[in-house]
Structures are given as structure tokens and as C-alpha cells.
Image (cartoon, grey):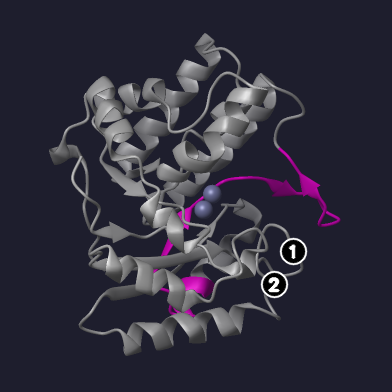
Amino acid sequence: MEKLISNYHTHTYRCGHALPNPDIDYVNKAIELGYKNLGFSDHAPLKGIHHPSMRMDFEKDFPGYISSIRSLEEAFKGKINIKLGLEIEYYSERDDYYKELLNDYHLDYLILGQHLRYDSNGDMDLYWRHIDDFEGIRRYVDDLILGINSGYFTYVCHPDLFLNHVKSLAPEVLKMFEDICLAAKKMNLPLEININGDTNNKYWALKHCCYHYPSVEFFKVAKKIGNKFIFGVDAHAPWDFDKINYPYFDEFLKETGITSSDILTELSF
Ligand SMILES: [Zn+2]
Ligand SMILES: [Zn+2]
């Protein structure tokens, strides 16, 4: 695999679970490693939802996030292309909000990162109650596909994240792989090979379960269906850019059959 020159999946301290470094530390690290493009896509605020360990707050954090990234974009012009985005779940009942983010707040892009839901009281509502809860996983995949079809998103983050809740690749799961890949293919949305799934998430997943993302099994299906791919660091600390295990991903690509012509190295805006 070629060394990355772009990463559009970068968090900041505002989400409450990334390291407390200032935004500029991510920029300096990316420049040091020769990146051409750096997109910030912190976990989006949701109006009326206060979830300090998961996402920034709409009133408290969002204005500062916009001004910080836009001023870095200006300050580093000519050295690195900085873009302003958000990682956000798709909730069909909030459909207007995505338009607002793109049109009123002039964000450069949104990436679809489906993690969890909230109930009508604003409390977290995980899709699944236990491992191999196929009904819960199906609800997750249905929401993900609604997001893919909505037209608001530039790419799909960790499309195989739900494998953290799967112990066996039952036919139900394989069918869900296909449904996601076919929807993304139809909408021409790249699927992310999430590097953080390898660097930070894998050990948790293997301890609690049998599968983790990014998954060879999922991406084999995606390759067969003819999807396009993009790598995402999903950085939660500046040094996550340094922790990419290139030999691991060489092997990953070999096993899935994905070649460099299937992978986007940068996005156009
Ligand atoms: Zn995510
Ligand atoms: Zn992320």
C-alpha cells in the first residue's frame, strides 16, 4: 500500500474521547509526514443532545470548531489543504439538519459514521443489546443504508463497524454486507478502510468478540461488488498518523483482492 497523502477522518478534543491536543498538533504531524490533504471530521453535535463523552456540543463547541479549522486552513495554505467536515450518524427524522450543516454552516463535507441512536429523551440507545443481536444489527444497517441513499455524505466510515457485535458470519450477516456494498455502489460512495479499527479497536474487539473492523470478509464482498475505497486514519491523537501498520494493510489488501486502482488517494471538493 502506498503511503497516505490524504486523511479526511480526524477528530479533535471536542468529542470528549480524543486526546486533549490543540487542533494545530494534527496539522503539524500531518505536514511532518508529508500529507497533502487533511480533513477534520469530528463527531458532530446534535441539537438538543448533550453527550460529552461522544460528541461536541452544538452551543458550546461547534462555533469554535468551525473558526479554529477555518483559520488553520487559511494559515497553512500552500503547505497542506485543510478541509472542514463532520462525522455524523444519519437519522431520517433529522433530515433537515444535514442540509443546514452543509448549506448554512458551509461545511466542506460530511462522512457517514453510524454508531448509536438516541431515544426520545435524548438518552443513548445502542442498536444491539448483546452480541449477535441480528435484529439490532439489521436496524443499524437499515439506518446506514438510509444515510447512504440520502445524498449528504462524501463517504461511509467504517461500514463494517457492527462486526464488533458479531460472533459468527451467519447468512444474515453476509446478506447485510451485500446490502451495504450494493447501496454504496449505487450511490457511488467510497467505503472507508478504517485504520483506527486496526490500531486502537482490534484488541477490544478480539477480547470481547470474534470479529473486528476493518474486516477481510466484508471487504472481499465489497471488492466483488465493485466498490471504491478510501483509507481513513480516524485519528483521535496526532500520533495516530504515525501508528499506521503499513505491512498489515498490505496483507489486508492482498487477502481482499483490492488493488490500488480501487482506492481513492484524495477527494475533490
Ligand atoms: Zn466513527
Ligand atoms: Zn471517527
Based on the picture, tell me whether residue 115 belongs to the magenta stretch. yes
> Which residue is located at x 26 percent, y 75 percent?
80
* Left or right side of 152 for 57: right
Q: Residue 12, how many percent across, how many down?
A: 54, 67
Q: Give the numbered dot on residue 57.
A: 2
Relative vertical location of residue 54 with respect to residue 60 in this rendering, above or below: above
Residue 9 appears left or right of 227 = right
Q: Is residue 247 above or below residue 237?
A: above
Q: Say whether residue 75 is left or right of residue 97.
A: left
Residue at the spot of label 1 = 52
Amino acid bearing label 2: Asp
Position of residue 266 measured from the top left corner of the image (x, y, whole percent): 23, 58
User: Which structural element holds mark 2?
Assistant: loop
Query: At numbered mark 1, what does the secondary structure look like: helix, strand or loop?
Result: loop
Instruction: Quarter of the image for the N terminus: give it.
Output: top left
- Residue drawn at x 47%, y 18% is 175
